[in-house]
Image: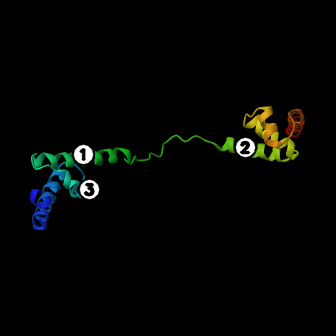
Amino acid sequence: MMKAQTGDSRAYEQLLRELDAWLSRYYALRLPHAAAQDARQDTLLAIHTKRHTYAPSRSFGAWVVAIARYKWIDRIRDASRYAALELDEDIAVEDHGGAALSAAALDNLLGRLKPAQESVIRLVKLKGLSIARASGATGQSAALVKVNIHRGLKKLAALVS
């Protein structure tokens, strides 16, 4: 590595070949084949990118092992994040059919109201806005919002019955 840092390309090529062989063995013992190959490539790239950080006064082996270990941990984390689960045919699935039908029926009923009544009922009764905020959103006075809600709910009750 010291020769590679000084620009000796032959030394660097030899170093990469030796590291490639060592990393292949290192990851073969720790990861599935595809993940081991990816980790090996990631590690070689990291070593190439960070080669300027190696200090010749320190152990080269310890430096490489540290990088390899971090890349191994990254692979394990990735595997746990994206682990595939087998789907069982007996998985409980909530039935939302009734809610969907109710929402469609409500939309149909609200569509039969005057637009001013429909909009304030959606804002106040369904979305939870205050009378004042519904008034500001629709341009209706607060008193008119209350009247339209009252009349709209009365008409909805008549339509349902």
Residue 39 location in percent, x, y?
25, 54
The image position of residue 10, as x and y in percent, is 10, 67
Residue to which mark 3 is pinned: 42
Question: Would you identify the image quadrant in which residue 134 lies?
Answer: top right
Question: Dot 3 surroundings within 10 Å: few (below 14), some, or many (20 or more)?
Answer: some
User: Looking at the picture, which amino acid does disc 3 mark?
Assistant: Asp
**Nearer the N terminus, badge 3 or badge 1?**
3
The tag earlier along the polypeptide, 1 or 2, is 1
Residue depth check, mark 1 versus mark 2: number of the one nearer the observer: 1
Q: Residues within 10 Å of mark 2 (few under 14, many from 20)?
A: few
Q: What residue sits right under mark 2 in the picture?
A: 103
Q: What residue is shown with label 1?
A: 70
The type of residue carrying mark 1 is: Tyr
**133 up-or-down from 76: above or below:** above
Amino acid type at image mark 2:
Ala
Is there CB contact under 8 Å for labels 3 and 1? no
Name the spot of residue 109 as percent of width and height, x first. 82, 44
Cα distance, mark 3 to mark 1? Answer: 10 Å
Residue 110 relative to residue 67: left or right: right
Q: Residue at x 38, y 48 (%)?
A: 82
